[in-house]
Image: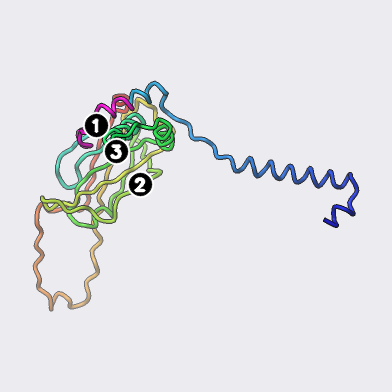
Amino acid sequence: MNIFINMNKKEICKVALAILMVGMLFSGCSKEKKPSVNIDEKLLQEAIEYGKSKAGVSNYEFMEPWSVYLGYEIGKGRAVYFTPFLHAAQMAKNAAEKNLKPDINIIRKAVAAKSNTLNFLILTYGNEPDASRRIKAYLIYDKTRVEPVYAHFPPFGEFNRDYYQQINGEVRFSKKDIPENAIVKLCIEILPKEEKEQKPHEHEHHHESEIVVGQQVQQHIITEFIFDLSKYK
């Protein structure tokens, strides 16, 4: 307080102006840039009505029109092109199944969060519990390999009745330089498991046989899911 008393009017004005400028700077930084929505309102409403009409349908059947299925084998399975339309429709479907009215503002915000990426849901099969840790996903467009900006696979698969490890994951790729009518290949690799180094003479003391149930896994599996993006809403 004593500082301001000893200052003249001109100095006080300078300090006040400086404080005002700093305040404006911080207020500008605190404003978050709103994400752009890559789906128009008419299409958003259509997606919501579509989702509501599919309440009660299994998610597998619901997503079938956006899916590429390659069979029930190690390294294969199904990939879903998770478009903004499908995303909005699924949220509306989930709300309708809980007897709730879909909130268009929440749906719009969720769709906007993924509007700048190509999004895929993956269901594949491994032969070992930790196969999901050795999965690599990438996109091929116009002979160019595109790495994901986001990829998630669980640390372990889910054991099913056919002795496979079911693996569910999600990957996202930047839309930059990929047109809406592009034909892309979603590639899933299961890398070979690194063999543990055997201690000297260890084989002389252990003669245990290894029993493998089900199909023998390949050393290096590469699977391609081909999508013509122009065919999907």
| x 54%, y 37%: residue | 33
* Relative horizontal placement of residue 49, taking residue 177 as reference (left or right): left
Tag on residue 55? 1
Q: Secondary structure at mark 1?
A: loop
Residue 153 belongs to the span the image colors magenta: no
> Closer to the camera, 217 or 36?
36
Q: Earlier in the sequence, mark 1 or mark 2?
A: 1
Q: Which residue is mark 3?
A: 186
User: Horizontal and vertical percent for residue 15?
Assistant: 81, 47
Q: Earlier in the sequence, mark 1 or mark 3?
A: 1
Is residue 193 in view? yes
- Vertical position of residue 23 compared to residue 80: above or below: below
* Real-space CA distance between mark 1 and mark 2, rounded to the nearest whole angstrom: 29 Å
* Relative horizontal placement of residue 21, taking residue 58 as reference (left or right): right
Q: Are marks 1 and 3 in contact (CB under 8 Å)?
A: no
Q: Which residue is mark 2?
A: 151
| x 28%, y 37%: residue | 98
> Closer to the camera, 174 or 91?
91
